[in-house]
Image: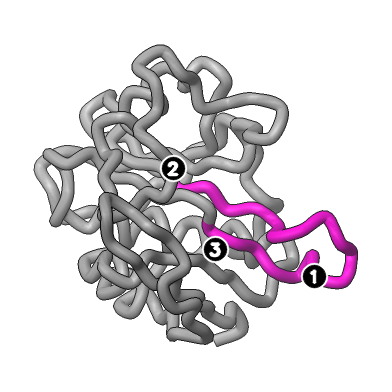
Amino acid sequence: MNLTISGSPPPLAGDRISMPFMSPHDLTIRHALAEDDRALADLNLSAWSWLSDVAPRPAADAGVFDERHDPDEYLVAEQGGRLVGFVRAVPPTPLASNQHVRQIQGLAVHPAARGNGIGEALIEAACATARTRGARRVTLRVLGHNLPARRLYERCGFTVEGICPEEFLLDGRYVDDILMGRRLDD
């Protein structure tokens, strides 16, 4: 699935990016709004797993947005009036020397909505938005044992650029941290 946003300014908070989607329900990708916090927190909690997360399970009352996590950094997927997924893409550092890069620092799809192209749609929308904001590359980190996510990223054009062996001890097992990247000028 390809998403292109051309000839328009970067999407702003609340702007909707409509995408063709092979489903009985329309899928809309848009920037998150402050009022999405509770729904995103619930989605984040439902998607949490040692397969994809390095931090402990979030508390049931924990929100998503704070001083380091702004709604404008998130794209959300809505289907049938419900949030079914999100992606967060941000500059990897505050340094001016790598502001041409965006890093995906969170991707979640509700377990009941997986396998319907929502993750791919979110990634493509994040790459398109990054491109409109001047990025030339998008990078991400994925746990070595998270084969479904690694296959998804590969389908979206990401390639392995580095491996940190046994970077995390999760649920009693050492797990590699895989760095992947994609050029946006293709």
Q: Which residues are magenta?
A: 87-104
The kind of residue tagged 1 is Asn
Q: Label 1: which residue?
A: 98
The image shows residue 92 at horizontal and vertical percentages of: 69, 60
The kind of residue tagged 3 is Ala
The image shows residue 42 at horizontal and vertical percentages of: 33, 23
Q: What whole-number distance in Å separates the C-alpha atoms at marks 3 and 2?
A: 28 Å
Identify the mark at residue 132; answer none if there is no mark: none
Q: Can you tell which of label 2 and label 1 is closer to the viewer?
A: 2
The image shows residue 70 at horizontal and vertical percentages of: 65, 32
Which quadrant: the N terminus? bottom left
| Disc nearer the start of the sequence (3/2) | 2
Q: Label 3: which residue?
A: 128
Foreground residue among 76 and 103: 103
Which residue lies at the image location 41% right of the left edge and 50% below the top edge? 54
Considering every residue shown, the one lying at the far front of the view is 172
> Judging from the image, what secondary structure is the residue with disc 3 in?
helix
The kind of residue tagged 2 is Ala
Q: Label 2: which residue?
A: 55
